[in-house]
Amino acid sequence: MNSQILINYIAFPLIKIAILLAAVFTVVAYIVLVERRLLGFFQSRLGPNRVGPLGLIQPVADGLKLFLKEDLIPTNANPFIFKIAPIFSFFPPFVGFAVLTFALPLIMPSGKMHQFAVADVDLGILLILSLSSLGIFGIILAGWSSGSKYPLFGSLRSASQMLAYEIPLTLSVISVIMMAGSFRLSDIVTAQQTYKFYFIIPGIVAFFVYLISVVAETNRTPFDLPEGESEIIGFHTEYSGMRFAFFFMAEYANVVLICMLTPALFLGGYDIPFLNDLELYKTHPYLVNVLGFLSYAAKSTLFAYFYIWIRATFPRYRYDQLLKVGWSVLFPISLLNLFLVALIKLFLMK
Amino acid sequence: MEKIKNFIKMITFPELIKGLSVTTKYLFKKKVTEEYPDFKPHIPYRAKGKLHVQIDTCISCRLCEKACPEWCIKVFPPPKEQMKTDKRPQEFYINQEHCLHCSLCVDACPTGSIHHSYEFELVVTNFKELLFNKETLPYNQLLKQYKWNYIENVPVRPRTTTPLEQKENTK
């Protein structure tokens, strides 16, 4: 009995976590490379292609370089907070991956069902939202503890930006939750499978509001005022070496997390398009698992490409424009949309 | 009607779609990057590279040596008795380390023996490698490599006849 508990509640989840973390780290490392190469292509360049075939070992080289760099702490900085801030920024996106479900449950030969998730929590989407707002602590602490005014300005910009865009983001996610009737991510996907249409159709407005505010949440290019690589000075100006790498990886982990969350909410997640999954699952469960996982991966890749595409295309917003769009355009639209979706749910979706 | 048009414009964002389509066009365009060490870059027709001397036509007049502002050419003419039959220099040094690629020696040469080649890779680990003598000026190998006759094709010398030929004509 005791060994059974050990296997079910400690060994099995630990293996799952190890596999998930390894996969996420690899994806995060390689999305950086893919982004750099694609940005090169968008600008008639080739991008990094020197290290290894097609530049595939570039992430290893980058990581090694950042790891071997000197770890500088400015004299004016508050050393304790300065050291702890990257961790605040680093861990929320990685925790967020735990609640994602990657395929329909695996049926073991003994008849047991195993979820393709580390923890399919019944408040999964809420957990991700709250963790994404926790990430802002890392940015504020980093900016404040650097002991320099420009990082502080950067972190303050970031704070009000995230506050402005968190509300439309949450409201558009709430419309999905209303349609699905559950906070659990696997339930949201199952609802789309049983309704036989994706939530992007009734929630098209919510989808676009979500897309815009999610780009702002992850501090990506049209809204990358907290960081502002090219002209304005961002919150991690004083950081170098491994601590900078933590911020860098946190940003890209956030991107990967959002790229995997968006299909689950709006495009049916691991649902296979043009096929009745739940019917097929009764006869060929393993086939549906594999195909479902592949379709989920394809949808996520689509969104990752979309992110990079947007970054290559649009110039940065001015700060007042950014807040104006957030508060006076997206907020009322998402509120109206919530009302609309409620009506749709009430009259059209039984 | 106008209001409807404006409304459609407002909700479809034509500018954004236009921008995205422009970047997509560039995604599939040919890339302009030249991958230099793997592929030889395009060298302009009148590029001035390393100096090279065609020893066979050189008459040891030392005009290039005197024209050089950096004193990087050193010609050793043959002894006086030999000068009557064979005017080719005994030794010819070019110190590429000091060369400005100014073409003054090329202009001064009466026979067109000294000229620039298309070789531009002058990075060495030891400065002595930049000192070329008669043997290490691989002119004939280069002619085969680039498959053209440099003197005939490149208009670096605007004069139709060399001073020597003019002298012969007046005789």
Image: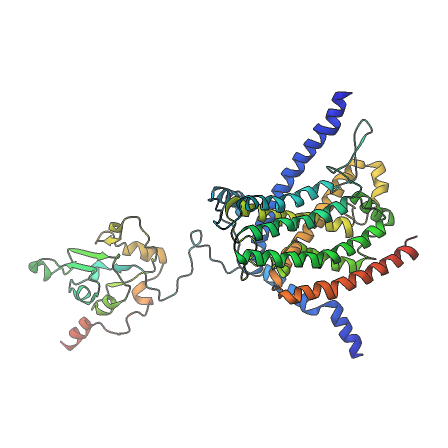
Residue A52 appears in view: no
Is A124 left, or right, of A35 in this rendering? right
| Residue that lies at the very extreme toward the left in this rendered image | B81
| Residue that lies at the very extreme toward the bottom in this rendered image | B2
Query: Residue at horizontal 83%, vertical 29%?
Result: A111
Q: Quadrant of the C terminus of chain B?
A: bottom left
Question: Exactly how many numbered labels are in the figure?
Answer: 0
Q: Position of residue A199 (x, y in %)?
A: 81, 53
Q: Quadrant of the N terminus of chain B?
A: bottom right
Q: Nearer the viewer, residue A282 or B132?
A: A282
Q: Position of residue A167 (x, y in %)?
A: 74, 57
Is A331 left, or right, of A138 in this rendering? right
Quarter of the image where one finds residue A326: bottom right
Query: Residue at horizontal 21%, vertical 62%?
Result: B57
Q: Position of residue B42 (x, y in %)?
A: 42, 61
Residue A291 appears in view: yes
Quarter of the image where one finds residue A90: top right
Query: Is residue A309 positioned above or below A287 on the image?
Result: below
Q: Nearer the viewer, residue B80 or A43?
A: A43
Query: Is residue A19 positioned above or below B171 on the image?
Result: above
Tell me the colour scheme of the image.
rainbow
Q: Nearer the viewer, residue B69 or A68?
A: A68
Query: Is residue A24 positioned above or below B33 on the image?
Result: above
Query: Residue at horizontal 82%, vertical 50%?
Result: A177
Quarter of the image where one finds residue A209: bottom right
Query: Residue at horizontal 28%, vertical 55%?
Result: B140
Q: Position of residue A33 (x, y in %)?
A: 57, 49
